[in-house]
Amino acid sequence: MKSVLIVDDAMFMRYTLRRILEKNGFQVVGEAENGLLGAQKYGELLPDIVTMDITMPELNGIGAVQLIKQINPQAKIVMISAMGQQHLVREAILAGASNFLVKPFSDERVVQVLNSI
Amino acid sequence: MSEILNEVVQQEEDTQKGKFLTFLVGKEEYGIEIKYVTEIIGGIQAITEVPEVPEYVKGIINLRGKIIPVMDVNLRFKKEARDYNDRTCIIVIDIDELSVGLIVDNVAEVISISDADIVPPPDARAGFHNRYIKGIGKIGNEVKLILDCQRLLSTENLEDLKYIN
Amino acid sequence: MDKSLSKEPMLEMFIFENLQLLEQLEQTILAHEKERCLENAVINEIFRIMHTIKGSAAMMMYDSISSLAHAIEDLFFYIREFHPDEMDYSKICDMVLDGIDFIKNEIGKLEQDQEADGDSSPFVENIEQYLLLIKEASANSNLINEAAARPAGLQKKFYISTSKSPPTENIKRYHALIYFTPGCEMENIRAFNLVHKLKDQAEQIDYLPADIIENNDSVEFIRENGFAVIFTTHLQQEAINELFMKEAFIDSLDLRVMEDEEWEIEQLRARNQIILEDEEPTISNNRAKETGANLHSGGSRQSLINVNVDKLDRLMDMVGELVISETMVALNPDLTTATRLDNFHKATRQHRKIINELQDIVMSIRMVPLTMTFHKMNRIVRDMSKKQNKNVELVIRGEETEVDKKIIEHLSDPIMHLIRNAIDHGIESPEKRAGLGKSPIAQVYLEAKSEGGDVYIILRDDGAGLDKEKILERARARGLIQKPDSNLSDGEIFSTILLPGFSTCDEISEFSGRGVGMDVVLKNIEAIGGTVLVDSAPGQGTTISLKIPLTLAIINGMRVKVGNSIYIIPITSIKESFKAQRGDVIVDPNGKEMIMVRGECYPVLRLHKKYQVKSALEDISKGIIVIVQNDSGSICLFVDALLGEQQVVVKALPKFIGKIAGISACTLLGDGRACLIIDVANLINPSKS
């Protein structure tokens, strides 16, 4: 079972993702509400996959990707983006994100992306 | 998950279907659907009287920290008050999130009555007055009066009485 | 099953979180509006909150909310990126506040299990138009920016890589045409991601459309025509195929080896429109800044969790049970037969101490600071003063004071009402204030403090004050006062403005005093066991104090015996108790009993009569008199005996019983018996409730 860390400042989104993931055979090992805590938790938990929101307080998703990549260059990170964030997603990819999802997304898409990496 | 839950509930309902708890009030034997009954308290514990309620509402009791009202079924049926003794019981029923204790003279047994053996009560013109009876169940030669719990607890009724008082 | 709990947890969380965000946003805006400029941090916060709301609403398919949040997000994106000079901050704040109101209202509907069916398009249009306006304005004032504007129209060009070497034997050139899964969104970035991954394995990568990042039309192009990539690699076709198909959202892939001639023709066609690819695209400046910012500030919110109030209520109940069962153990009648109980008593003392601490902790969990409630008032003050052209400053003190969560819910409306009234009727126009030598900026103080077992919420304004004569005249005309003038204190006169019927709606326009809907205030505060006091000085302002019990859940009660029944009288309302002599009682012609205490006359209420209790004492001299009071008066209660003080857990009367005049709630005694709690306010003034 793949372990997942959810990083998102919106409780609602964390909850929604957790529900989708747990329903589809992933193990959610942790949640974090900003990029900084996300990177910290990554170091503690070393999950197989991270879902990473982009717009967050303290440290945004791209900064968090950069930090996580320093901890583990092989880290698998899926960005959770919204319409209109093309540039940021691109930066996240350059920083090392594996793939991305665009809100609103269906359960199916989440599973597709997480299984592909 | 919810499907499993539904199934369990379904099963429970199935096993409870057609089962009635029978008890005595005066000389008559009544039955209520077992699904409404949450527990039976033997003997009468201290009842705290409450002002401004109809006579049949005897007051409130403490049921493991929950405060529930109790009514005397005898008085509810406008029959003469009877003294409570060691056979007197409180049947706690739960309908639509409302818990109420029914004071009855004696609890008899749990019996099964199939739908086919339940007939509607005779109407008032035939001289039948108890509006809390929703059916009459036949077990061999015996007859049990099946109570309409909803009507028994109808609070609008209680409100009405409060104004009259 | 409880219906309130059955709301889908996702929806519940959506409502909870977004209302909190909106509240936070509103406060931020109000706090900064006056500064006539928005700091970067504030702009960022607005942007971020709107972004979050947009995302969550889109997931829940609340399109009107999501599109409005998107419009505001866009507006603040522009403001953040381009810092336009020509901005009307007041208008921007209005627009955001209107947006907040709309979304709040929609969420309110969801809370009531209704559809969020509002139409946000007028707001969206308004915001978009304004965004266009400031874009144009800054374009005119800053022509240099135009050079940076993005090229219009889609450039159908291949990128030509800067490093070039012809394919060798082992290295082949491939052409791949990729279609993405319909609806996967941001196809251009997915294409970019593919290219990015390809870089590790391939060289001389060219692709069509070329400007996949800069031009959003490329999305449409990719959807219709697919994404074409040409590259050279030492990998075998199968390996490449696998590499592509492993990616998510690839609908179809057409991969073939490309011959050199074909490639050269392709190159020739592209010759006139060559763009050189940068080795590593630069990250736009402000984003890099955002990325690096605040690396050192930790997350302080981490230690907070959200708990359903119902769960807290249950916990509270359980602790209440624990308190009772402890008493049942410690005072168990079986113990009287035992001879030595020293160790037992020691153990129970310790037990009780722990339970008391537990009770304190549980109570404190339920306590919530008034901060949110108080800060909500900023908006009211802002809107009211804007509408009435008055200059009013809200001064908030003691917002950290904590009250029970249940009480907080009852406070918002009364405070809002009082503030509206203060600004509407109390505060004078700036001209008038200037004429009176008052500061043109009026002040409304909102203060909270706790004293003893109560919390005081005090609202003071420096307006015109109440007109005593006018109020008296009116109260008499409406039959609200019976006593002669000389017996009335100022407080009593002012308090009549709180009574229902003091003023009616049709008179709002011409009546310049206060009292419009003030009975709502009284009703709300009394519902939570509080009282309202009014004081005023002409020309200097009015002070209204709300006195609120600290917690609803546990009260100190006096157990009193009436016949075989026991009742609880809240200690806070007991003034004194005494034995009366038969001769102290006076009976008026209507049979009403009264008693003189130190020259004052109190009506006597025999509880056994009031509650139809049998076998109670009838003889006044044998029982005991308890004087109870609240702000509307005092009364003597006649009971058989006082049994002692006790903390009791307040429980609502069963729904089946409903509301009973003179009884506020019930509780359980140490011996497990249920017992009724006396509603003192109702006994003193039955007509009020």
Image (cartoon, coloured by chain):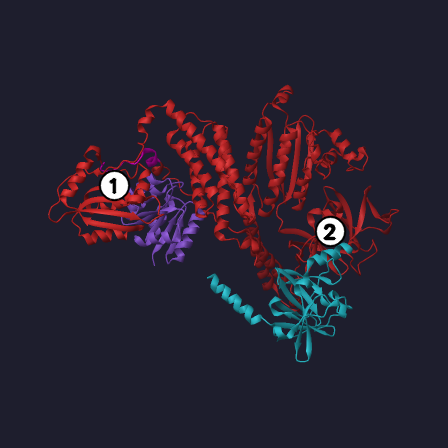
Chain colours: A purple, B cyan, C red
Q: Nearer the viewer, residue C84 or C543?
A: C84
Q: Name which residue lies at 80% across and 55% down.
A: C609
Q: Nearer the viewer, residue C9 or A34?
A: C9
Inspect the magenta stretch and tell me whether residue C280 lies in it. Answer: yes
Q: Nearer the viewer, residue C24 or B16?
A: B16
Q: Amino acid at mark 1?
A: Leu
Q: Relative to B29, is C604 above or below?
A: above
| Residue C653 horizontal side relative to residue C259, left or right | right
Residue under pointer 2: C662
Please identify the dominant SS of the magenta region.
loop
Q: Residue furthest right?
A: C589
- Image coordinates of residue C370 in percent, x first then y, are 56, 41
Q: Residue furthest left?
A: C169
* Residue C208 - label: 1
Q: Dot 1, crowdedness within 10 Å: few (<14), some or many (≥20)?
A: many
Q: Earlier in the sequence, mark 1 or mark 2?
A: 1
Locate the N terminus of chain C by quadrant.
bottom right
Q: Relative to C365, is C214 above or below?
A: above
- Image coordinates of residue C598 in percent, x first then y, are 81, 42
Q: Residue furthest bottom?
A: B141
- Check disc 2 and report its element: helix, strand or loop: loop
Q: Which residues are magenta?
A: C277-289
Question: Would residue A6 be visible to someone looking at this image?
Answer: yes
Q: Name which residue lies at 19% across and 49% down.
A: C256
Q: Nearer the viewer, mark 1 or mark 2?
A: 1
Inspect the magenta stretch and tell me whether residue C22 lies in it. Answer: no
- Check disc 1 and report its element: helix, strand or loop: strand
